[in-house]
Image (spheres, coloured by chain):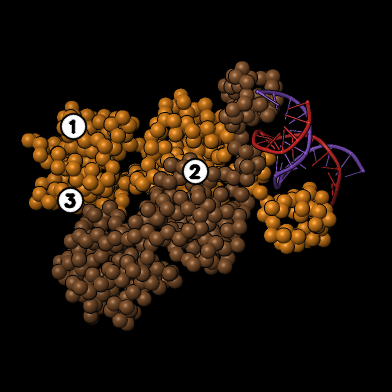
Chain colours: A brown, B orange, C red, D purple
DNA sequence: GTGAAAGCGCTAACAC
DNA sequence: GTGTTAGCGCTTTCAC
């Protein structure tokens, strides 16, 4: 493999001159520049990026920790990140964690080992206490709010969005409201329950089903909900695909939507548009874009992205 | 930043010994190993990965060129790639090309600059003649078949899948069949047209609408198709979201599916499951997994992944 | 078993 | 303007 020394030798100049040409330095004699470029061309030379990264201590690469890599919500965030990265000539490496603490730490170690200039944590498995020390080695931005000032945040106000959605259901006369969540132990689930208590009072345990990610999960959840003696008249689903599953099960039981059952989903996904399901759009693409911008700016700001509720026919 | 020299000095050994400990070499005296590990621990030291990559000439990172980063079909491939990469301790960098030839070449240059051990091309903008020379610098695997033996392939037989889908429609009595595609100039579109001609004879230009990617595109395409004097009785959509849009428009015009209009989609996506749309599943996740395996094995094999047709209520 | 020393391919301070 | 040279942080002969 030809390197910078070869080019220097063949062009009859020193390596510094070659380096200067490579980096578009101004003060290089026109003829030397040309002869260097000629040799580079002839030898089909490309500088070794690892050597450059090693010296510069910078890779223009950002790691994005995603719990799942086939989840539409996290795909939306990733999409936003990629948009911004492309604009700014950064590369994105996808780091699937599966909510494994060990995996997550492994990725943070890669930040420390200088592979990434920064890391975006879309959702975390570890405590902040474990994560924060790594912010010494690069910018860490979270897609969830935290008051720790070592960490930048591009987040939305989940709690308010839930409050507003529940309020909407209540205003349409629903008091027996059930909901689904992804993970029992997550922050979102906590906020969901708090918001529920705020609007509807004590939550009946049978009105909450966790572990819902896809259409099938929604279908099964609906089956459970609708077999309850006091069956809910409205369901909030943690994603439009889950909502789609609920919709399908309800339809299969000849229920009219929204007359017999109101459904509201989340994240404004294609299936929701297709099936006419109302949704709480947390604007995850924007969250991703903002997160990426913060890393690029090496900023530890806390930026709140507004959510919006899109009303369609299902409520 | 503490480096290997510091560790060596503090542990009272040479850098080679530290390196040996770091790489789990057998022949290191137990006590030296322990004292090195102790210092590493104390100093909170992590080796610089760029330096290692520079020396080893290998990064255990694979680049994946995707034309779009918010397209469900390419997301499926990426998902498969990520699965396999995770299993084998490789990292994946996402390279959005937008079908720009220049961007694509830029990414191939990164292969040459030693940033990636290999590249997966899910769909390409450049000619093979432009791409092939880069296979000298790392393994290149394509998700489309090519006979060039410098390039590994993890692909499906698109043409046969289209033939079979059209045959299915014909067997149900459809002769006026329309279809949508993504890009006029793509290989898939060519194969689609060829398969159409094979089954139905000459294609009427008004029975083909290109530029379809999402639900809205499908909706508009359906609007056009269904206003034709001789309107089609069946539509093949290049994706289940497009199919979903077609479905919605048809429903809005009080058409019965499949009695008044048959619809078949592609890639077995959630919206299709939700709406009960038959689909041609090209098993893109498997394509992605296989592509990743080929890069890891540095193989130039051609592996065909079987497709399958999932019949639901829309045909 | 262990250390000295020569690189990997590049940048940048410094001298001229 | 240009060349010399000392690194960046690590691996890996080679000799002992």
Mark toward the viewer: 1 or 3:
3
| Cβ atoms at labels 1 and 2 below 8 Å apart | no
Any mark on residue B183, and which?
Answer: none
Residues marked 2 and 3 touching at CB (< 8 Å): no
Residue at the spot 58% in from the left edge and 24% down from the top edge: A44
Depicted A188 relative to depicted A43: above or below: below
Q: Residues within 10 Å of mark 3 (few under 14, many from 20)?
A: many
Q: Is residue A119 left or right of residue B257?
A: right
Q: Chain of mark 2?
A: A
Q: In which quadrant of the rendered image does the C terminus of chain A lie?
A: bottom left
Q: Which residue is mark 2?
A: A90
Q: Residues within 10 Å of mark 2 (few under 14, many from 20)?
A: some
Horizontal side, residue B18 vs residue B155: left or right: right
Residue B200 seen from this side = yes
- For label 1, the residue is B200
In the picture provided, is B289 more to the left or to the right than B222? right
**In the depicted view, which residue is nearer to us: A134 or B305?**
A134
In this view, the residue in front, A118 or A232, is A118
CA distance separating discs 1 and 2: 48 Å
Q: CA distance from mark 2 to mark 3?
A: 39 Å
- Give the residue pinned by disc 3: B248
Chain letter for mark 1: B
Residue at the left extreme of this rendering? B229
Q: Residue at x 44, y 30 (%)?
A: B102
- The relative height of residue A23 versus residue A293 in the rendered view (above or below) is above
- Do tags 1 and 2 sit on the same chain? no
Q: Quadrant of residue B45?
A: bottom right
Which badge, 1 or 3, comes first in the chain's sequence? 1
Label 1 sits on a secondary structure element that is helix
Q: Residue at x 78, y 61 (%)?
A: B34
């Amino acid at each position: 493999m030809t390197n910078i020394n070869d080019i220097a030798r063949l062009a009859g100049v020193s390596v510094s001159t070659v380096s200067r040409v490579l980096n578009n330095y101004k003060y290089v004699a026109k003829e030397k520049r040309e002869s260097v470029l000629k040799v580079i061309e002839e030898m089909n030379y490309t500088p070794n990026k690892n050597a450059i990264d090693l010296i510069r201590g910078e890779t223009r690469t950002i790691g994005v920790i995603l719990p799942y890599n086939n989840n539409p919500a996290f795909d939306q965030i990733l999409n936003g990140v990629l948009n911004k990265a492309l604009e700014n000539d950064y590369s994105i490496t996808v780091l699937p964690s599966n909510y494994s603490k060990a995996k997550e730490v492994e990725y943070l170690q890669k930040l420390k080992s200088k592979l990434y200039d920064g890391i975006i944590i879309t959702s975390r498995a570890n405590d902040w206490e474990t994560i924060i020390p790594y912010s010494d080695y690069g910018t860490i931005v979270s897609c969830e709010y935290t008051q720790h000032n070592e960490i930048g945040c591009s987040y939305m106000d989940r709690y308010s969005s839930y409050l507003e959605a529940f309020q909407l259901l209540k205003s349409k006369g629903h008091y027996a409201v059930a909901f689904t969540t992804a993970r029992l132990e997550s922050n979102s689930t906590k906020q969901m329950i708090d918001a529920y208590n705020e609007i509807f009072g004590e939550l009946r345990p049978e009105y909450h089903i966790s572990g819902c990610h896809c259409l099938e999960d929604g279908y099964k959840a609906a089956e459970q909900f609708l077999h309850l003696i006091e069956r809910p008249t409205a369901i909030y689903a943690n994603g439009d695909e889950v909502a789609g599953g609920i919709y399908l099960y309800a339809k299969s039981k000849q229920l009219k939507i929204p007359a017999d059952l109101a459904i509201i989903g989340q994240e404004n996904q294609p299936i929701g548009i297709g099936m006419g399901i109302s949704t709480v759009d947390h604007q995850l693409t924007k969250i991703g874009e903002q997160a990426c911008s913060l890393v690029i700016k090496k900023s530890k700001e806390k930026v709140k992205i507004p959510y919006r509720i899109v009303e369609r026919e299902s409520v």
